[in-house]
Image (cartoon, rainbow, N blue to C red):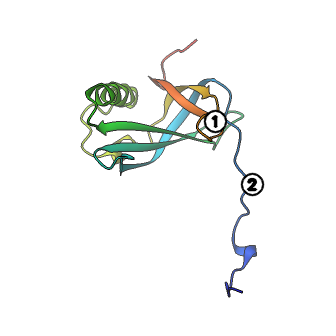
Amino acid sequence: MAHLGFDATQVQPDSGQLDPIPAGWYNVMVDESDLKPTSDGMGARLAVRFTVIDGQFANRKIHTRFNVRNSNPVAQEIAFKQLSALAHAVGVLQVQDSQQLHGIPLKVRVKICPPKDGYDAQNDITAYKNINEDVG
């Protein structure tokens, strides 16, 4: 037996894993970012969390990763192009710290990736646009 001293009245119960949001364009803001090692430990990826700021899926979270240091130059080039798209969308073109990207509304296009390698279906961001840009 393990003595926990845990009071469940002080913690919001976990509602379980949510299904991915439907594919489409969403208004979001970056609210969290962190540089983490790649799975092989040889590089680094910028993990970014977005929060949907309006509509039916307000407050839902969408995650993405940018391989900013990678032994595969193609993976790194793709990451820099995607990070550039994010930077342009929020109007921060000289990014010294990922915190500079936080709290600025933008639009992202989301798709649903099917389940693979034992993971459930999840969302992936495929495009970034300025909040005022028409995405039709």
In the rendered image, the residue lying farthest to the top is 136
Q: Is residue 45 left or right of residue 49?
A: left
Q: Is residue 52 left or right of residue 85?
A: right
x and y percent of residue 11 in the render? Answer: 69, 69
Q: Could you tell me the amino acid type at mark 1?
A: Asp
Q: For label 1, count other residues whose C-alpha is less than 10 Å away and answer few (under 14), some (14-19) or many (20+).
A: few
Residue 99: give its label: none
Q: Secondary structure at mark 2?
A: loop
Viewer can see residue 126? yes
Q: Is residue 39 left or right of residue 80?
A: right
- Real-space CA distance between mark 2 and mark 1, rounded to the nearest whole angstrom: 21 Å
Mark nearer the viewer, 2 or 1: 2
x and y percent of residue 4 in the render? Answer: 67, 84
Q: Which residue is mark 1?
A: 54
Q: Quadrant of residue 70?
A: top left
Q: Which residue is mark 2?
A: 15
Count of number-bearing discs: 2
Q: Quadrant of the N terminus?
A: bottom right
Q: Tell me if residue 11 comes above or below residue 16 in the rendering.
A: below
Viewer can see residue 102? no
For the point 35% across and 46% down, which residue is it?
Answer: 40
Q: Tell me if residue 78 comes above or below residue 41 in the rendering.
A: above
